[in-house]
């Protein structure tokens, strides 16, 4: 669904990252990164090495691998291969505790809900549909839809109709989520329920605050929008 105007009496817009925010997928992402890096380097790359190399910013990731980030054809191939690997993975994700309940409350309170993710559209749709989350979202922007994170275009394409950007909240577990939210002018909130999330990185890149559980995020929204969910 593409939105061009706010819904009647909408309270605001909440933009969710997918991996590490809606669903627990650390091992899934690390596995995909391991497959791709092993192919690039021509040797098996262990999990510990991937933990040191991986970053959700594809340009930074390529740079860490010693690749030429000015080679656009190479970057396109990397993105295409990343999507292929994600699409062929078996389900290794599940929603975090409290996420479904939060989405239900936000929908009932008439918030516009969106997804902005570094995952491809096909696997994002599959995961959210599998866990019964897809119907809560008005729209989403994925890796193969738009300019990748941290560029804010994926946010702009969904919520530019909100002139008052203080009514737009972006929540994610990565520094790229905070960068994109800040560049757009939305309120960045760091999600810390994924074990790999680093509060220092999120704060450095502009997080207004960091929350440890979906319930803490709910409390922030209640305070910010002056309502009870």
Image: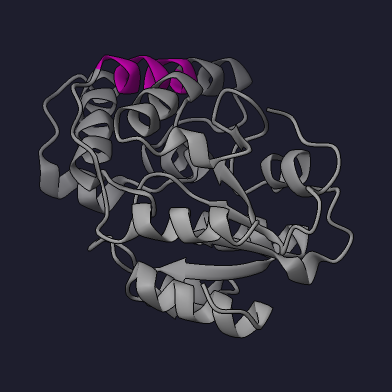
The location of residue 121, given as percent across then percent down, is 50, 24
Visible in this render: residue 117? no
The location of residue 90, given as percent across then percent down, is 18, 22
The range drawn in magenta is: 78-88
Judging from the image, the colouring scheme is one colour
- For residue 192, side relative to residue 72 (left or right): left
Please tell me which residue is depicted at 20% across the width and 19% down the height of the picture: 42
- For residue 84, side relative to residue 91 (left or right): right
Relative to 131, say whether 98 is above or below: below
Q: Residue extending furthest right?
A: 163
Please tell me which residue is depicted at 66% across the width and 83% down the height of the picture: 226
* Depth check, front residue: 40 or 19: 19
* Depth check, front residue: 150 or 171: 171
Please tell me which residue is depicted at 33% across the width and 64% down the height of the picture: 197
- For residue 75, side relative to residue 23 (left or right): right
Q: Main secondary structure of the magenta part?
A: helix
Magenta-span inclusion, residue 131: no
The location of residue 211, given as percent across then percent down, is 40, 76
- For residue 31, side relative to residue 131 (left or right): left
Visible in this render: residue 20? yes
Q: Quadrant of the N terminus?
A: top right
Relative to 40, say whether 201 is above or below: below
* Depth check, front residue: 210 or 147: 210
The location of residue 143, given as percent across then percent down, is 54, 30
Magenta-span inclusion, residue 82: yes
Query: How many numbered discs?
Result: 0
Relative to 84, say whether 129 is above or below: below
Relative to 92, say whether 198 is above or below: below
């Amino acid at each position: 669904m593409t939105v061009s105007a706010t819904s009647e009496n909408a309270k605001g817009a909440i933009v969710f990252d997918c991996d590490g925010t809606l669903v627990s997928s650390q091992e899934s992402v690390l596995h995909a990164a391991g497959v791709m890096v092993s192919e690039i380097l021509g040797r098996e790359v262990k999990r510990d090495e991937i933990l040191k190399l991986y970053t959700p910013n594809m340009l930074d990731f390529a740079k860490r691998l010693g690749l030429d980030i000015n080679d656009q054809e190479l970057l396109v191939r990397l993105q295409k291969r990343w999507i292929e690997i994600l699409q062929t993975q078996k389900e290794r994700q599940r929603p975090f505790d409290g996420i479904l309940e939060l989405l239900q409350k936000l929908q009932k309170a008439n918030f516009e809900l969106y997804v902005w993710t570094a995952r491809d559209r096909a696997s994002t749709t599959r995961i959210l549909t599998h866990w019964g989350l897809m119907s809560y979202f008005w729209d989403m922007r994925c890796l193969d839809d738009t300019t990748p994170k941290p560029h804010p275009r994926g946010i702009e394409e969904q919520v530019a109709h909100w002139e008052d950007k203080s009514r737009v909240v972006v929540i994610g577990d990565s520094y790229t989520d905070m960068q994109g939210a800040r560049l757009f002018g939305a309120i960045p909130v760091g999600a810390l329920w994924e074990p790999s999330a680093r509060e220092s990185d999120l704060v450095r890149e502009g997080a207004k605050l960091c929350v440890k559980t979906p319930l803490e995020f709910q409390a922030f929204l209640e305070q910010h929008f002056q309502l009870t969910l």
